Amino acid sequence: MDFAELQDVIERTYGTRDHERGVAATVAWLAEEVGELAQAVRKGSREQQLHEFGDVVAWVATLANQQGIDLNEAIQRFARGCPKCEAIPCAC
Amino acid sequence: MDFAELQDVIERTYGTRDHERGVAATVAWLAEEVGELAQAVRKGSREQQLHEFGDVVAWVATLANQQGIDLNEAIQRFARGCPKCEAIPCAC
């Protein structure tokens, strides 16, 4: 899946419920999932890490959907390397 | 860009420096960027939100690179809807 496909399936799967709960609830869920990812990276198995990376990206997609943000547009800043120095590798 | 292209450009742009700083530093940066995203969602402009969404996704990609995780594999759990109930929309 690319970012558009992910945002689409997340919207169709969770969109109604997420919009009812509101943005603040999504920010809280995202923070919780980032904590779980931090733990998985510190002491989890590869399977646990895969799970938590997936959850974090899915919650970022949910929040982007709620805000009307296209994640593919958001990451274009990095398409040609560092957004600040415009070099690969970064020379900042 | 898809997830593979993003992870590749992030690795080429920041990989050497990120690997030198280590995983804990990346987790700290990611936490900081999630905080900035939370603020942008609460009171930022659309441009600021785009910026912060991009930064969060980029730091997730950095952490995934450091852990040898393929983000496209990580999000496959959501490809057919909710990973728990396997329904679209989620019926959990």
Image (spheres, coloured by chain):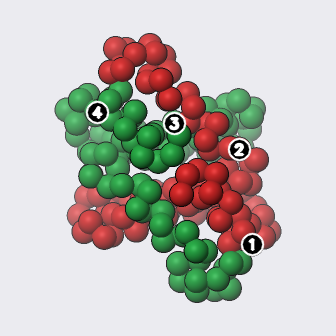
Chain colours: A red, B green
Residues behind callouts 4 and 2 on a single chain: no
Is the Cβ of the residue at disc 1 closer than 8 Å to that at disc 2? no
Mark 1 or 2, nearer chain start: 1
- The image quarter containing residue B30 is top left
- A22, B77: nearer the viewer: B77
Q: Chain of mark 3?
A: B
Q: Which residue is mark 2?
A: A69
Q: Nearer the viewer, residue A61 or B3?
A: B3
Report helix, strand or loop for mark 2: loop
- Alpha carbon distance from label 3 to label 1: 26 Å
Question: To which residue does mark 3 refer?
Answer: B55
Which residue is label 4 attached to? B15
- Residue B55 appearing in the image: yes
Q: Which kind of residue does numbered mark 1 sit on?
A: Arg
> Is the residue at mark 2 from the same chain as the one at mark 3?
no
User: Residue at left 64%, top 51%?
Assistant: A4
